[in-house]
Amino acid sequence: MTINKLRMPLDIVMTLLSIILMGGAYLFPADIVHEIIGAALFVLWAVHITLNRKWYGSMFHGKYNSLRIMQTIINCGIFVCVIFLMISGIILSNHIFTFLGIEIGLGFARIVHLLASHWYFMFMSFHIGLHAGMIAKKIAGSSRTMTNAGRAKILVCRIMLALLCIYGLHAFITRGVWRYLILQQQFFFLNLEKGYILFFVDYFAILSLLAAITHFIGKIIKKK
């Protein structure tokens, strides 16, 4: 498998794991599962960064236009959040990293973990939006060979995306995601009465909304 073919399944797995982790330890019968998935995601991020090391190596070379500035801010935002999640996760660990014997700063680490996890989700969604064009091209096919069926497929996808984004805005508000981003709410709450499936649907819709916004902002910037 070539590097390019490896990137897509890696990104899909990382996205799914990220959504699962947004539910905290509430989604699992034991919090060790959350720790294992979190550690696995960090390893996958290390692989992701390794596969894209050329991008990081080129950060200090070449000219910066508006789109490149946006890409850099988003990617660096993810990197910073991942570092804070790793450090706070190790401090809060009740299983995997207990051998380190860290018993100080638990309260601060919990707040950092809550804040970093939600900003990570935001930046990850923005990051997906930067590459949404490639996904759209695969769905639509080549513009030179566009058929009526292809155009109809695009129209249906756009309608579905619009509905998903509207629901995503509703989920963003009702789930109180914005409260965590500014630490207005410092304790994570998951309403289990709504069910696990609705949790995944809500966060997938929020991700889609943020990715769509980023994608269209990127298109506007490219036209300038």
Image: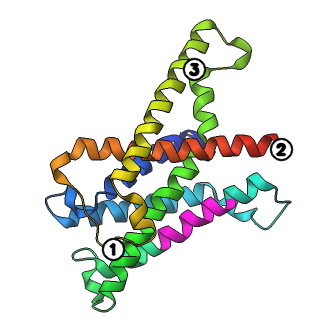
- Looking at the rendering, which quadrant does residue 40 occupy? bottom left
Residue at the spot x=48%, y=68% of the render?
82
Say above or below: 192 vs 222. below
User: Which disc, if any, is residue 224?
Assistant: 2
Q: Residue furthest right?
A: 63
Residue 54 visible in this rendered orientation of the protein: no
Name the amino acid type tagged 2.
Answer: Lys
- Looking at the rendering, which quadrant does residue 166 occupy? top left
For discs 2 and 3, the disc positioned in front in the rendered view: 2
For discs 1 and 3, the disc positioned in front in the rendered view: 1
Say above or below: 205 vs 120. above
Question: The residue tagged with tag 3: helix, strand or loop?
Answer: helix
Upstream in sequence: badge 2 or badge 3: 3
Write the start and end of the magenta stretch as one range: 72-83
Q: Is 127 one of the magenta-colored residues? A: no
Question: The residue tagged with tag 2: helix, strand or loop?
Answer: loop
- Whether residue 15 sits left or right of residue 152 in the image: it is left
Upstream in sequence: badge 1 or badge 2: 1
Q: Is 77 one of the magenta-colored residues? A: yes
What's the CA distance linking mark 1 and mark 2?
40 Å
Q: Which residue is mark 1?
A: 186
Q: Position of residue 143 (x, y in %)?
A: 71, 19
What's the CA distance linking mark 2 and mark 3?
25 Å
Residue nearest the observer in this picture, 52 or 139: 139
